[in-house]
Image: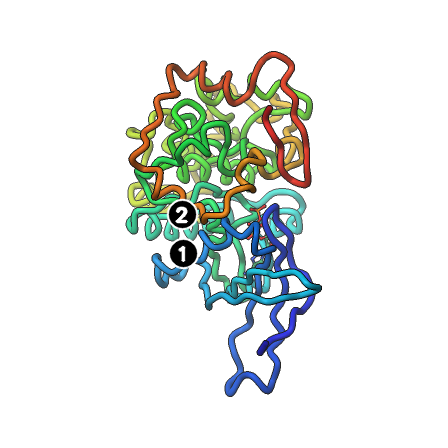
Amino acid sequence: MQWIRGQTIGCGSFSTVNLVVPNKKGFSQCPPPMAVKSCENINSDSLKNEKEVLDQLGFCPQIIRCFGDEYTVENDEKLYNLFLEYANKGSLADQVKKSGGNLVESDVRRYARSILEGLRFLHAKGFAHCDIKLQNILLFGNGDVKIADFGLAKRNGKEGGERWRLEIRGTPLNIAPESVNENEYDSPVDIWALGCAVVEMFTGKSAWNFKPGTNVAALLIKIGVRDELPAIPAELSEQGKDFLRKCFVKDPKNRWTAEMLLDHPFMAGDDETIAMNRCEEEASTSPKCSFEEFSVSPRLPFDFPYWVSTQSTASSQSNFQQNSSLVSSSPSYVSSPLDRIRQLACDQAPNWSVCGSWITLR
Ligand SMILES: Nc1ncnc2c1ncn2[C@@H]1O[C@H](COP(=O)(O)OP(=O)(O)OP(=O)(O)O)[C@@H](O)[C@H]1O
């Protein structure tokens, strides 16, 4: 082994992330600062999917770089390790916390622009990330902002297959309506989730009014079936509000793409224009709907970032391979959005069993 496992810098539902300390003997030159994301080999489908997707994507300044993988045996356990460039400023979620719980609009705009640039590249390559959230946006000392955690990423158009029928990819609060209703996870889902992330950056609260203990089926019905949309913060500039309206379009075919959103005035506007617009808005007499009307939602639903059944852990194939192999077996399970929501969140006293950061639907 040409490296030593350094301090732990992050933990996710699938893996642990450590600093890589180079073993001097192994390297002829000083390598770039690296992080290693590791998990047990038997549960490495997601991490292997991440490697496969990152390899296919190639270089993009707004996407985390992958330097390869390696197996190790540590404490008699076979581990799968993925080497990534090290983001020395942590995640955007950390940054929001450090800034007192929310960010000023100019920062929100700057981060949103970087995320969109990464998404434009990803979507043009035919992939969807499927888990855009503040914890998966990493920051660097030189100001770079990069999308990370491609464990749930998939090729557009590929069915998740039977495995995903009763499972939700990613964070439930950022889930797009078509994923709730049709089990559809293509690039528009990342735009919906970006809208949720923008609200969260600006307000410090998740986009939906969801209190711990609230009926989950009700939340899914709200997202999937009802006309309701996440609340748009009243304090945001007009451009910001309009930007969010373009993200929160229920029909994915009419939702703006990353390419379109990069041309939106919110992305182009400079801080002075925004400040002027805000003054004009404040002067207007139109009644405001305050975001505070909505009660505080948890940062993570149920205090857990993922909501996936344990069935997924049993697979020995990578997600990517599994998704590919199931393309032809088109599922006939969706009869109506409400039927699907009933499948996802049985309204007869569902048993939400909790294990680690996973929630199992029974
Ligand atoms: N390359 C990196 N540099 C610095 N920190 C990182 C890096 N990769 C991950 N982290 C930190 O580790 C945390 C967990 O990483 P990541 O989200 O990739 O793991 P995961 O197991 O896929 O988690 P989850 O799927 O639950 O979001 C991140 O939120 C971040 O704080």
Write down the residue under mark 2.
320
Local crowd size for mark 1, using a 10 Å CA cut-off: few (<14), some (14–19), many (≥20): some
- Rendered location of residue 29, percent (x, y): 51, 85
As rendered, which of 103 and 247 lies closer to the eye?
247
Compute the Cα span from label 2 to label 1. 8 Å
Amino acid under label 2? Answer: Phe
Please say if 24 is above or below 350. Answer: below
* Label located before the other in sequence (2 or 1): 1
As rendered, which of 206 and 328 lies closer to the eye?
328
**Disc 1 on helix, strand or loop?**
helix
Instruction: Respond yes or no on whether mark 1 lies under 8 Å from ligand 1.
Output: no
Local crowd size for mark 2, using a 10 Å CA cut-off: few (<14), some (14–19), many (≥20): many
Placement of the C terminus among the 4 image quadrants: top right
Query: In percent of the image, x 59 and y 59: which residue is there?
Result: 38
Tell whether 80 sits left or right of 259.
right
- Rendered location of residue 156, percent (x, y): 32, 41
Amino acid under label 1? Answer: Glu
Please say if 360 is above or below 17. Answer: above
The circle on residue 52 is 1
Q: Are marks 2 and 1 in contact (CB under 8 Å)?
A: yes
Query: In percent of the image, x 42 and y 26: which residue is there?
Result: 177
Residue 328 occupies which quadrant of the picture?
top left
- Rendered location of residue 118, percent (x, y): 39, 52
Placement of the N terminus among the 4 image quadrants: bottom right
Tell whether 201 sits left or right of 156.
right
Residue 75 occupies which quadrant of the picture?
bottom right
Query: In percent of the image, x 46 and y 48: which residue is there?
Result: 317
Please say if 277 is above or below 36. Answer: above
Q: Residue furthest top?
A: 348
Residue 323 occupies which quadrant of the picture?
top left
Instruction: Respond yes or no on whether mark 2 lies under 8 Å from ligand 1.
Output: no
As rendered, which of 334 and 234 lies closer to the eye?
334
